[in-house]
Image (tube, helix red, strand yellow):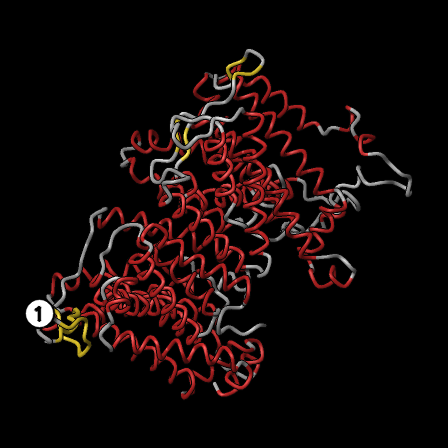
Amino acid sequence: MAVTEDTSTAPINGKPQSWWSGLSLSSIPTPYWFVGAFMLLLPVLVGPFMLFQVFGWALILGMIALSLMFLGGYGGMVSLVQMSVAACAAYMLAIFGDSAITQISLGWPWWVAIPIALVIATGFGTLTGALAVRTEGIYTIMITLAIASAFFYFTRQNYVLFNGFSGFNGVKPPQLLGVDWRQPIPFYYLTLFWAAVAYLSVLYVSRAPFGLALQGVRDNARRMEALGYNVTAHRIAAYVFASFIAAVAGILLVWLNGQVSPGTAGIGPAIDILIIAVVGGLARPVGPFIGAIIYVLLRTFALDFMVSMGLSGERFQLLVGLVFLGIVFWSPDGILGLWERWRNRMNSTDRLTGETRDKDGGSEA
Amino acid sequence: MKGFMARNPFWSLIIVLAICFLVWAIFAPWPPGFVDTFGRKKIFLNALFNGVTLGALYFLVASGFTLIFGLMKNVNLAHGSLYLLGGYIGYDVANTTGWWLLSFVVVFVVVGAMGVLLQVLVFQRMEGEDLRQTLVTIGISIVVADLMLWYWGGDFYQILTPDWLSGPIQLPIVTAVKSSGEAVFLKYPFVRIVILAASIVIGIAMWLSLNKTRIGMLIRAGVDDRDMLSATGVRIQRVFVLVFAFGAGLAGVAGVVGGTFQSLAPGEDTRFLLASLVVVIVGGMGSIPGAALGALLIGLAEQFGSVYMPTYAVVLTFLIMVVVLAFRPQGLLGERR
């Protein structure tokens, strides 16, 4: 199905097309202009708190959820370990780079520490993936959940390397080009840049031969194997790619919070990432970002909202749980699925034949 | 068993030797050199017994999980919530009526009824949709965890052991020999031994009813080929509801047991969900003997880990899981499908 999703970038008439030929300005869909302009002009519209704590955080969570969406949506492997991969990158940056815990941190310059952190975190994600792909479907969720909690317990009990319960604080982004990257506006643009890179690369990979083969593996692994594809290698490669995205997000996350502790990668946050990805929708790369912004807004303002409604603010978790339950119960493909169904109902005439479609035709995902 | 010995003579020999060594380590007084390397025998014996009883508790939780998964391929990630809910309800019942045994009956019925609701309202609507079931049960466990926090608060609860079960008893196992030549015997809480015996009885009863009764025959047939079984005219949905109620009730009963010899608090639901996940992954999905073996291994690993290498005790259980996955992805006693 996804093969025919968008034919505009596929080679036509067998003519060899280079990858940039589709990138003329007119070929960029209109929504991209609006969203891009909105995101770029956001610092003019909202204050530093919204920029830093709401949109910065949402973009980072969106990237981590995007890595889950790539694995789950295109690879059919729902991995709960992505938050741990991000936290692993954050820990490694704190260990190799600078932090307030000087007896552990090595204090290497950022251009050494960041690549090392990315490589180690990606390696961790890949190892997990190599274990997880030995099993299928529902087992993947259980195994990755178990590995994520093992990571949580390990970091909580290891004081030599991970500084145990309290973790690391005082991790700051470097002062580069005369800009303090921890100020809201520069940090917002930094996260926006990397989120856009992650989004576009997922979009690109999903239409590249590797991504198409991965979707083939998701739909019918045995047939792909019979066609000569190495199914295991494709799945592990998907883990490498997704783990790298999560690792980049982890480095941004530790800069945003200024600290990393076992709680960053607990079982709760790992499940929150799944919630974000599912609420947004696992079918498209934009879903996780929508889910993340909803989650962060809920997280930030639900407390005030509930108190103003006369309810106890402690029941925040209940609200999140009910929203999540409602969405997975009635719309398994998330907010995006709801939106698509609504749009289908609005223009229910078939574009091809001009006839009126069935009421529920084409709404099933 | 015989087939295993014929196929793997080397491993059989090692297993037999290990069992002999274990029996010797349990019953014989330890020589001094041994004590120097491994610490006092009492510590070892306590770790062993705690490990076995913890394994019994894990078995109670995980057997319901594995039965439900094996028959219906339903992944019930709200299983830990059922455990904690059972514990809380058992605490309330035991506290108000003063009857410890009554709480087991009430909890089994109430939590079993919750299981029926789950099966009818959730799982029957989304049969075969693995991911959706997982997500919905995660959502349910979040909601239920917060409701329980609301009602019971964040305190620790412990269900009081009734008088006739409390206090230690003396086991005929020598821990040390005094200089006067008098032997010191191991003292162990009676209630833990009763719980261990009860879970062994439950395990054997489950195995017998699975292998020797008509309903067990239906369940085993359902595990092998669900569609064919329903084609022969069995009302398979009824079997499903029954098994789900039983598995959920067992989780609730395990909650009462856990509340008696450990304690109940928010967060225990996730802990026991993870424990049963690891147990069934190690033992093999859908296999009751596998759940027993996995529970025993994990319980022992946790207790011995906390005695001999306290820093990494929790990680040890996950390490076992990773090793099993790497060499035998279907679990120790699981069957490859």
Question: Which residue is found at the position 46% from the left and 16% from the top?
Answer: A47
Let me know if residue B110 appears in the view: no
Closest to the observer, B63 or B33: B33
State the image coordinates of residue B292 (x, y, percent, origin top left).
38, 73
Let me know if residue B315 appears in the view: yes
Question: Which residue is found at the position 11% from the left and 71% from the top?
Answer: B179
State whether residue A166 is above or below residue B3: above
Residue located farthest toward the top when viewing the structure as drawn: A178
Amino acid marked by disc 1 = Asp
Q: What element carries label 1?
A: helix
Instruction: Look at mark 1 in the image and give the residue it sits on.
Output: B163
State whether residue B154 is above or below residue B94: above
Question: Which residue is found at the position 61% from the left and 53% from the top?
Answer: A76
In the picture, measured across the screen, residue B7 lies left or right of residue A206, that is: left
State whether residue A2 is above or below residue B217: above
In the picture, measured across the screen, residue A363 lies left or right of residue A158, that is: right
Q: How many labels does the image show?
A: 1
Q: Label 1 crowding class (10 Å Cα cut-off): few <14, some 14-19, many 20+?
A: few
Q: Where is residue A122, by image quadrant?
A: top right
Question: Residue under mark 1: which chain is it in?
Answer: B
State the image coordinates of residue B26 (x, y, percent, origin top left).
27, 75
